[in-house]
Amino acid sequence: MTRVERAKQYAALVGKYAHDGEISAVGRQTLQRQQMQLQLTDAEVEAIEQHVFQLLKSPAEAQPDDLAPPDSSPSDRTTPANQVAVEAQDEPEKLQQYEQEFRHAMRLESPLSDLLRQGLQQFQHSLNLSNAAVEAIESKVTHQFQTEQSQYQAALEKYSQEVAQEAALGLPLSQEAQDHLAEIQRSLKLRPEDAQAIEERVCARLLLQSPPTELSDSPPTQLTAASAPEALTEMPPSEAISFISADEMPPDDSLPFPLNPTLQETSPEVSLRSEKGVDYTLLRDLLRAANWQEADEATLKAMLLAANRTDQGWLDADSLLRFPCLDLHTIDRLWSYHSNGKFGFTAQWRSYPIPKMSKATTSFQPSRIAQEHTLKFVKEIGWWAERVEFLKYYNRLTFNLNDAPQGHLPALWYWEIPWWKSIQIGGIGSSRGGCSADDQSISIFMSRLKACGFE
């Protein structure tokens, strides 16, 4: 897309969100995200907005007759004599428009922030509504919203308790348990995405708080005395669960953290073993050449192959929860070795603020705390845009070893999502850029790293 085309695309959005030469708070947030995605500078944005406002205020060469609908006759046009009658007819429609805008703002943030409040006031002035009319609308909608939210929150909490009880009996959930939860979801009238989010969160936290030795993997990754090499069967459980033998490890001096001496060897290469037959040669070569962004793209393609998700093009919660351990270790060793420990899953695992708790505990981490940990994590590894308070667009990440924070890459395993999911979590349909940081995918992936012996 050329710069002119990007400017035109931004100008079209400005025209959509502009009211009386101003842009509401809700519109401004959307435009800021679009600016980052289109890579427009602040100066370019300011020039585009001024031009659009000028056109809206006094269209070039426009005459009163030119602005009338083409099929209308002079007798059909509004005159000062019937202007009051037209405004009276438009009043219910204007009230409805404000009510819809206020409902949307309440869903975005409740209680309303000063920024959203300013946007609503500007919208009120553009509709020429009185304060009394607006107060009546807001009082009615607020009461309805609070009642609905209270009822829905109670339903979510009840469903969370039911999921926790079923999950405590064993994971993965049995078919009987899934059918039982589906019936409860229908009876509580929960949105499918909300029910799925609760299931993912509860199961991930249960796995995250369980010791690795209590977790079983898919048959191909289980090592038994009959099938494992003799040297591996003699290893302690904490080492055997990593599925990595001595000939797979880089030299000790290649990483900034200590390695178990029983797992070291002298070869400078990292083994490219894969449980699913994935060829990691391209990823290795890209990392050798320090082509970090291309290596991130190759990592996603390899992970999609290992998870059998190539057709879907992204890693959902279930695929992250069941990702093959051997492939996780291979990818991590490649990234860690070639970045001297700065990149890779180990670096990301160490950046995640895992609560210090007993491995024997079965209590679940409160949602608020999980969200705090996720936000701290994305800030720690440089994925969060502080100024605008949402995840950076992918092209704004740092693909430079010297400047990137610890654990910054790989990132596409998390970033790549379909457009509809991006819209659901606050984006504009282009991966996770512009979205809030959801704790489900992060906590699920961290639980998988724990299960695969990354502690």
Image: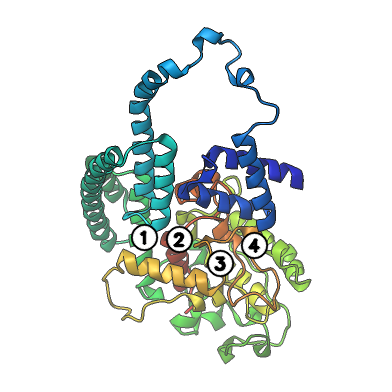
Q: Amino acid at mark 1?
A: Arg
Q: Compared to 432, does 267 lie above or below?
A: below
The residue under the point 26% across, 52% down is 156
Label 1 or label 2, whichever lies nearer to me, is 1
Q: CA distance from mark 4 to mark 1?
A: 29 Å
Q: What kind of element bears circle 4?
A: helix
Disc 2 packing (10 Å; few <14; some 14–19; many ≥20): many
Look at label 2 and name its amino acid.
Leu
Mark 1–mark 3 CB contact (< 8 Å)? no
Q: Nearer the viewer, residue 262 or 329?
A: 329
Dot 2 or dot 3, earlier in sequence: 2
Calculate the distance from the C-alpha at mark 2 to the C-alpha at mark 3.
Answer: 22 Å
Q: Quadrant of residue 282?
A: bottom right
Q: Which residue corresponds to mark 4?
A: 396
**Residue 383 has which mark?**
3
Which is more N-terminal, label 3 or label 4?
3
Q: Are marks 4 and 3 in contact (CB under 8 Å)?
A: no
Residue 122 in view (yes/no): yes
Q: Tell me if mark 3 has few (under 14), some (14-19) or many (20+) residues whose alpha carbon lies within 10 angstroms of its own.
A: many
Which sits earlier in the primary sequence, circle 4 or circle 1?
1
Q: Mark 3 or mark 1, which is nearer the start of the sequence?
A: 1
Residue tagged 2 = 321
| Quadrant assignment, res 135 | top left
Label 1, secondary structure: give it: helix
**How are the colours assigned in the image?**
rainbow
The answer to which of 348 and 453 lies nearer the viewer is: 348
Rounded to the nearest angstrom, the CA distance separating label 2 from label 4 is 28 Å
Q: Indicate the amino acid at tag 3.
A: Trp
Does the CB distance between marks 2 and 4 fall below 8 Å?
no
**Picture residue at 30% right of the left edge, 42% below the top:** 131
Q: Which residue is mark 1?
A: 201
- Across and down, in percent, residue 314 comes to 56, 52
